[in-house]
Image (tube, rainbow, N blue to C red):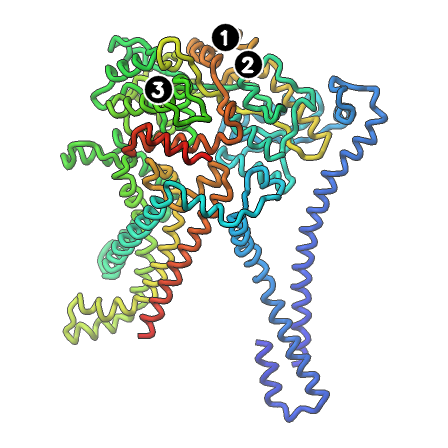
Amino acid sequence: MSGSRRRTPVRVAVSGGLILSLALAACGDDGDDAATKTSPPVVASSAASASAPASGPTATQPAVASSTAAAQIKPVTILAQTYYTDEPSHSLWSERLTKCGAPHQITVKHESVPGGELIPKILQQGQAKTLPDLIMVDNPEVQQVAAAGVLLPLEDFGIKPEGILEQVTKASTYEGKLYGAQPDTNTLAVFYNVDTLAKAGVTPPKTWDELKAASAKLSGNGNYGIAFSAKADFEGTWQFLPFFWSAGAELDAIDSPEAVSALTLLKDLVDSKSASKSVVNWGQSDVLDQFTSGKAAMMINGPWNFPALKTASKEKGLKWDVATVPVAKNGAPSGAPLGGEAYAIGKTGNADKEQAAAKVIDCLMSDEMQLEIAKNHGLIPTRESVLDAFAGSAEPQMKGFVEQIKTARARTGVVGIKYPEVGAAIHQAMGAALVGGKTPQEALAAAAASVK
Amino acid sequence: MGVQQIESVNVTTAPPSAPLRRRRMSVDRQARIAAWLFVTPAAILLLLVFAAPLAKNVQIGFEAVTPETFISGEAKFIGLDNYRTVIDSANFGKLMTNTVVFTAGSIVFQFAIGLALALFFNKRFPLNGFLRSIVLLPWLLPLLVSTTTWRSMMDVDSGIINRGLMNSHLVDQPVPWLVSTSHAMLAVLIVNIWIGIPFNMTLLYAGLQEIPKELHEAASLDGAGRVRMFRYITWPLLRPVVAVVLVLGVVYTLKVLEIIVVLTRGGPADTTQTLATQSYFYSFANLQFSLGAATSNLLILLSLAFAVVYLRLNRKAAEV
């Protein structure tokens, strides 16, 4: 009896102690983490006075320059985070990052998270102070992430956007500072089936009127003239922008008459059965399927589809080429949205690692890397001086894209960090107008009202 | 166990002397402390894993959380502004209607078909086990896989469903399952009902198996027909299981997300947008965390209300 009475408290003490020690262990981990993260800068600053004379190319920033010297001496391991979860993209990027780090004794660990989770993940990491050192961000989201305060300005590390397409730089600039470096980009253009167009006696349309006429002529028997994505998603908004901008509309006035005319064009195409109603449910990969299966004679899509299209050429004898997106009327501006990913430095507080990340980014921005990335991932270099060499060496179809990229625009150029809100309002309006029984005017007016 | 033993010992002891009483007090206290300490690990886990996220969600619903304040943790308290924005938004009425139609439609058909199948399989016949396991299939497939398959089957131009309907001349025009405002809700309902049938069938079947066979035998000897046997024996004895199936069904259906996101992304033109999908899009597509939290808090309230109402009704029924 007395035995059982005594045992109970002992057991409790043991189990209680276990919990306590677990809790302590957890706290201890945190403490250690914080220590490793905050101590290096102290070391670096003490080394600063010693190695100050050996100033590198970033001499304007003494504290930073000192850790440059430190990084050259001792090897550093940094963590890079991308959304390339699929193969071969993931391996290609791992290889590339390793190659960029090697000359500076930087080991780059590469991790990928699915695209849809990337921004919430970065915000979480920022909150928990576990940011990666090198962070990939889709270009329309750079400003948003920079505004959250988890990135460092690249100029502080001597990275300048020299010779980079102006609109590309604009996408990665927040409050006058550059936060992302984008080695390569992409955009949208019209892919067309060469044989189908020739058979129907149609040339690639240059204006909206020609687009409507050509699509009508190419439709029938369950086939459609043109396929595009008007999904209730940012993919839908992205595909609408070439028409939106060519009409002369701007993202800060999405119910303007110009915007209405662009949405009217898409509605006309769907209503006249020149495009399938399914456009409201198609993503860009569905659009590609429609094109490669011969169900759509033309499609709006991007250069990342080149590998799939080459396979289709080989297997099914599909002949395809690329033209720029038709403009509102002769002489109207051409303007497709800029795509692609930017690379940024995470604000980790570890000067050595921040410096190392900067070196890797610098390497990614070199001419050779821009060309190599472009070639392996179906992208287009962002340095203007590289563009012509690229157009010469790439597939002949890439010429359409190189031409389109020169007038392409950043989605965040006018509305900045409000783009997610505006973009969501636009795809909402597209659905409402295309199949929801609203007129383009009503749909866009409602969309504009929803954006505060 | 230990506590009971100690108490029984105390009862049998003769009138305690002063020192003994003091000892009993301390024993009682020890037992009480021990009880608390045993509860503590579970309580901590529950608080940490369930209560804390919920409390955080409620808190975010009252604050202006943006990507910036997410990091800095300095979100401003704005009272009911988020709720006002959500409720005043043009599509809120649609959201509520859709949520109710989707939930009610799913539950009614899942339950009816599930019950019919459960009654069917409750009989003995060859291949019973094999057929029953086939009905379970929708439950075994990953949601993403089955829903993506449905999406391609329901394609307006090349989907197998429309081709079948056209070839058998049941329709003249392809049915715009996922791309028209008049059909999209029906389409997501069909898929959700298909996915929900195995859950309903399995639980109801287990409930039926629990009903003693003698009752039905006795009833049939007394001359009761099938309908009367179901009405007076099967249904009353199945009630507790029915309550569980319906409450869980409502709660599961209210929060359905993947099916709608994959099939239509809430479109076209918000036709299939529910509180659950809208809350997801606010938070994870538009990065409007506060609006997302407010919407999901409304969703939680709604599902809580459903659960309470149903449990009350059921308790009343049980008392009668």
Do the residues indicated by labels 2 and 3 lie within the same chain of the protein?
yes
Check disc 1 and report its element: helix, strand or loop: helix
Which tag, 2 or 1, sits closer to the chain's start? 2
Q: Nearer the viewer, residue A380 or A92?
A: A380
Residue A195 sits in quarter = top left
Which tag, 2 or 3, sits closer to the chain's start? 3
The amino acid sitting under disc 2 is Leu
Q: Residue at horizontal 33%, vertical 57%?
A: B202
Query: What subunit carries mark 1?
Result: A
Q: Give the answer, above or below, for where A399 lies relative to A38.
A: above
Q: Nearer the viewer, mark 2 or mark 3?
A: 3
Which tag, 1 or 3, sits closer to the chain's start? 3
Return the residue at label 1.
A393
Spatial separation of the CA atoms under disc 1 and disc 3: 25 Å
Q: Residues within 10 Å of mark 2 (few under 14, many from 20)?
A: many
The amino acid sitting under disc 1 is Ser
Return the residue at label 2.
A371
